[in-house]
Image: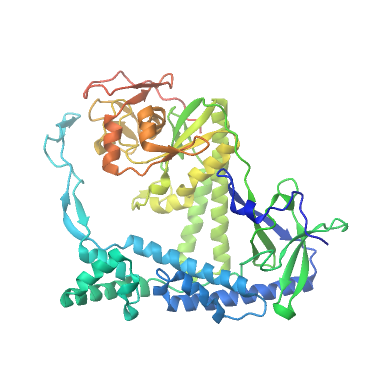
Amino acid sequence: MKHSRNKAPRTKAQNDKKPESARLLSGRLTASVKTNAGKISEVLAVNHDALRLKREMSAFVLQNILRVPNDAYGLAKEYTQFESRYLNAWERQKLMEDVVGAYARTLSNLLARSRFLVQAGWTFETYKRAVVRNGRTLGRKGEVKPGTFRLSAAKSTMARAAEILVQCDLSSLDLSKFNKTNQALLTRIASDTAKWSRLLALVRTRQDRLIFKRIKLHEFTTGTHRRSPVESCSCIVHDASNGAFQWFYRMRIGTHKQRRFVHLPLAFNNRYLAPGDLRLDAAHLLQVKRGGQINILLTREASVPVFKEPGEILGLDVNTKHNLFATSRNEAYDYDRTHLDKVVDALNRLDEIGTRNFTYKDRAVLAKNVRRTESVIKRSIHDMLDAFETQSVTDIVMEDLSQFKGSLSSRHEDFDVKYTRLLRLLRLGSLKAWVAEQANKRGIRVHLTQAAYSSQQCPKCAYISRGNRTTQEQFCCEACGFEHPADFVAGMNLERRLRADVLSKKLHEFDPFGQARPKMVPRAELKGILTSEAWGVIDLQTHRFEQHRPPLRGRHLEETPPIAANAV
């Protein structure tokens, strides 16, 4: 039995230096159900020992939580305190790094949402002109717009110092270990005893409330751990002389003189994924699922996508109330709402139990509903892209939904569920990745742009105002009087941001394949770019884009043509 693969093994230099276009995807090989029961029991023993180590390491890291932000590397080296008869030093080190990384992400998210700020004043917006609708005056020139009062915050010297110290262990504080900037700031405050005492009291209060009370013990439930062909002596091997199975996973069990090897036959579908397509010389994960299924999780390099020649561009807006997608061509695409109604009912039943009282079966039901919903949404995307290909669409423009960090407390009328929960059910943040994955396989580029003002800007005169959205369903421009269903207005604006040369260059960066990604433009600056630079409109009859300078404010446009039939 020898180590081989269909392709020549990659060298270390090739692994370290990948082309910019290379992207790693996951691949899974599963141990055959015909595996000897004795071998399975040995693998389960290794899995149980790895789970024990992860739980012990988790408790240790929680006790030293303040070392995570400043000394994560040193904390990870404490793996030497934990012994195992099955895992060697490299495997235990990687386990410790994974546990420290889990707590680091939790701590980082908490600190990012809790900043030290001081009140700087109030900001508000006023009407630049009188706004009259249906004979009723909504606001006069100079009056404050309703709902625009906002508290503005600023950082003080004490606030900056508190953000530095909140991640430190105050019992062993050494100012000499900080960089020169932070050291100078803290030394200046420490020279004033009263200020320093006030600062330490503030930091201790925040640590007690934010860190010690809110960060709970990470209770790991699986013994999944990393292995390597070199450090672990565990790898995929090929035996062409075997009649039943030719691919095996050679797994090391035990350490030092007690180590031995077991060979697990692998089952896979050669039509979709063959072992030779995977990076067999790289580190991988060993996973044992409930029920005894043994998986080896590896990586593979994605093929370089081939895109079509530039042709039709389409703006695609994501919605939740009446449809899932709305295009700049006045077409809407929806998902199976009957299925989602059943999922919401199942979740409501689980809510009565309470997440803390979930059994394994309850969690399995929840996971199954999530997978089904994902499958339904992906099928809707597949059908939508089929329609786009018949229209010769080569480029799609979408909002970068990862920048949305707000929460919605209102409820969806059809499902009687909060919009925040509905967005999580639909996995709104993953939609762009799902669309891009399927579209790239078809040679269609997916461009991302900033979501700000896409539903508040008029596609005819570029005027931006919250008042343009008279209702959730209707858009009516306060400046030029343009009216249109609101679901399609955002798609028109998204398409314009890519088509207009000035907007495209100022708002986007482009990857090697020509796909746009949004630049980090401040919101105030973004509004100025959208309203003052060269721009264009979309002809609602021909769906052609015309680029020009904005017309004078207040010019009324011709009547909007009827909307195309819903493509649902």
**Residue lying at 43% horizontally and 22% vertically, measured from the top left:** 543
**Residue lying at 47% horizontally and 75% vertically, measured from the top left:** 61
Compared with residue 498, is residue 223 higher up or lower down, i.e. above or below? below
Q: Is residue 94 left or right of residue 140?
A: right
Compared with residue 551, is residue 297 higher up or lower down, i.e. above or below? below
Q: Position of residue 409 (x, y in %)?
A: 33, 53
Camera-side residue of 386 and 215: 215
The figure's colour scheme reads rainbow
Q: Is residue 36 left or right of residue 427?
A: right
Determine if residue 5 is in view.
yes
Q: How many marks?
A: 0
Q: Position of residue 75 (x, y in %)?
A: 47, 74
| Quarter where residue 128 is shown | top left
**Residue lying at 32% horizontally and 19% vertically, measured from the top left:** 559
Q: Position of residue 296 (x, y in %)?
A: 68, 61
Which quadrant is the N terminus positioned in?
A: bottom right
Compared with residue 31, is residue 135 higher up or lower down, i.e. above or below? above
Q: Position of residue 284 (x, y in %)?
A: 64, 61
Camera-side residue of 124 and 255: 255
Q: Is residue 505 left or right of residue 204?
A: right
Camera-side residue of 219 and 237: 237
| Quarter where residue 486 is shown | top left
Camera-side residue of 437 and 72: 72
Determine if residue 418 is in view.
no
